[in-house]
Image (spheres, rainbow, N blue to C red):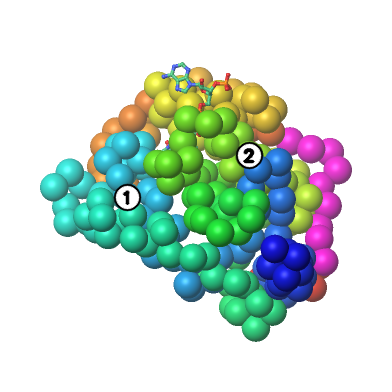
C-alpha cells in the first residue's frame, strides 16, 4: 500500500508542459493522453448520454455495452513526464477516481480568446452521485485558475436537470433566455446558457510556459 501510494506521488508531478492536474473532493483530473481515449469515449456512448450529447444518430453502429464496459475497466494510464508531454486534448481533463484506478468521465473546454465553454459527462456507473458538480467544477478551475480565462460558459438542454443543478451548484447563472440549438446529429433542443466569471483569473506553470 505504501509503495503504491509512493508510486502514485512519483508519477504525479503536477502541472507541466501542456498538461494540467487537478484534484477535487472525490476525483483526480489530468490532461488526457492517447491511452485514455477509448475509455473517455466509452463513458459517453450509452443511449442516455448520447441522447444529451447527440454525437451519434439512432441506429448508428457504436461499441456494444460489453465493449464499452471493457474499455471503461481498462486500468488508467500512468501519465509519466514523457507521456504527459504529448497531451491529446490540451483543454480537456479526464476524470479518474481519487486512487486513479478507474475512469470516471471527461470534462472538455472549448477555448476562445477570453472565454471558455465547458461541457462533459460521467460514465454511467458514476452518475447520480453528485459528481457532476466536481466534474464541471474541475473544468471551471482549469479555465479560471490554470488557463487565465475570466469567463466560462456552459449550455445544456432545458430539461437536463442533473446538468443544470450541477452547474448552478458551483455558481453558474443563466445568461440568456433558452433558445433552440442543433446537436451534432441534427436533433434540435432548447438550450439554456449559463455563465460564471471571476475578476482574478490566474495561469499555472503549464500555461505560462506553453505556447499553444
Ligand atoms: C450531466 C451529468 C454530468 C450530471 O452529473 P450527476 O452527478 O450524474 O448529477 P446528479 O444525478 O447527481 O444530479 C445533480 C442534482 O440534480 C438532481 N436531479 C437529477 N435528476 C433530477 C430530476 N430528474 N429531477 C429532479 N432533480 C434531479 C439530483 O438530485 C442532484 O441534486 P442535488 O444538487 O440536490 O444533489 C451526468 O448526469 C452525465 O454525465 N449525463 C450524461 C451526459 C450529459 O448530460 N452531459 C451534459 C451535457 S451539457
Query: Which residue, given by chain and number where applicable, does mark 1 sit on?
Result: 45
Residue 94 forms part of the magenta stretch: no
Q: In front: 184, or 61?
A: 61
Element under label 2? helix
Q: Which mark is residue 154?
A: none
Residue located at (83% from left, 52% from top):
202
> The N terminus lies in which quarter of the figure?
bottom right
Q: Local crowd at mark 2 within 10 Å, few (<14), some, or many (≥20)?
A: many
- In the picture, the disc for residue 134 is 2
Q: Residue at x 70, y 44 (%)?
A: 24
Magenta part of the chain:
197-206
Q: In the orientation shown, which residue stands out farthest toward the bottom? A: 82
In the displayed structure image, the side of residue 49 where residue 168 appears, left or right: right
Q: Where is residue 212 in the image (x, y as percent from the top left)?
A: 66, 71
- Image coordinates of residue 94 in percent, x first then y, are 55, 57
Main secondary structure type of the part rendered in magenta: loop
Identify the mark nearer the N-term, 1 or 2: 1
Please report the residue visible at 79 percent of the width from the left and 38 percent of the height from the top.
Answer: 198
Instruction: Give the residue drawn at x 81%, y 58%.
Output: 203
Viewer can see residue 67: yes
Q: Is residue 149 visible?
A: no
Q: Does the residue labelled 2 lie within 8 Å of ligand 1?
A: no
Q: Quadrant of residue 42?
A: bottom left
Instruction: Locate residue 88, reporting x and y percent.
Output: 53, 70
Label 1: few (<14), some or many (≥20) within 10 Å? many
Q: Is residue 13 above or below residue 39?
A: below
- Counting labels gives 2
For the view shown, which residue lies furthest in the right direction?
200
Q: Quadrant of residue 3?
A: bottom right
Mark 1 and mark 2: Cα distance apart in space: 21 Å
Q: In this view, does 191 lie to the left or right of 45?
A: right
Amino acid at each position: 500500500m505504501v509503495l503504491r501510494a509512493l508510486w502514485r506521488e512519483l508519477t504525479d508531478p503536477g502541472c507541466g508542459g501542456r498538461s494540467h492536474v487537478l484534484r477535487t473532493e472525490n476525483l483526480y483530473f489530468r490532461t488526457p493522453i492517447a491511452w485514455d481515449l477509448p475509455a473517455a469515449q466509452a463513458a459517453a456512448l450509452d443511449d442516455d448520454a448520447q441522447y444529451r450529447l447527440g454525437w451519434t444518430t439512432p441506429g448508428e453502429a457504436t461499441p456494444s455495452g460489453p465493449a464499452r464496459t471493457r474499455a471503461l475497466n481498462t486500468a488508467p494510464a500512468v501519465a509519466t513526464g514523457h507521456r504527459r508531454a504529448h497531451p491529446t486534448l490540451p483543454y480537456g481533463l479526464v476524470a479518474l477516481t481519487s486512487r486513479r484506478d478507474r475512469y470516471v468521465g471527461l470534462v472538455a473546454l472549448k477555448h476562445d480568446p477570453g472565454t471558455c465553454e465547458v461541457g462533459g459527462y460521467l460514465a454511467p456507473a458514476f452518475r447520480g452521485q453528485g459528481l457532476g458538480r466536481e466534474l464541471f467544477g474541475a473544468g471551471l478551475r482549469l479555465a479560471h485558475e490554470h488557463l487565465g480565462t475570466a469567463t466560462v460558459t456552459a449550455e445544456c438542454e432545458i430539461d437536463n436537470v442533473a446538468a443544470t443543478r450541477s452547474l448552478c451548484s458551483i455558481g453558474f447563472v443563466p445568461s440568456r433566455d433558452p433558445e433552440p440549438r442543433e446537436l451534432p446529429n441534427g436533433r434540435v433542443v432548447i438550450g439554456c446558457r449559463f455563465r460564471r466569471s471571476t475578476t482574478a483569473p490566474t495561469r499555472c506553470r503549464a500555461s505560462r510556459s506553453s505556447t499553444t
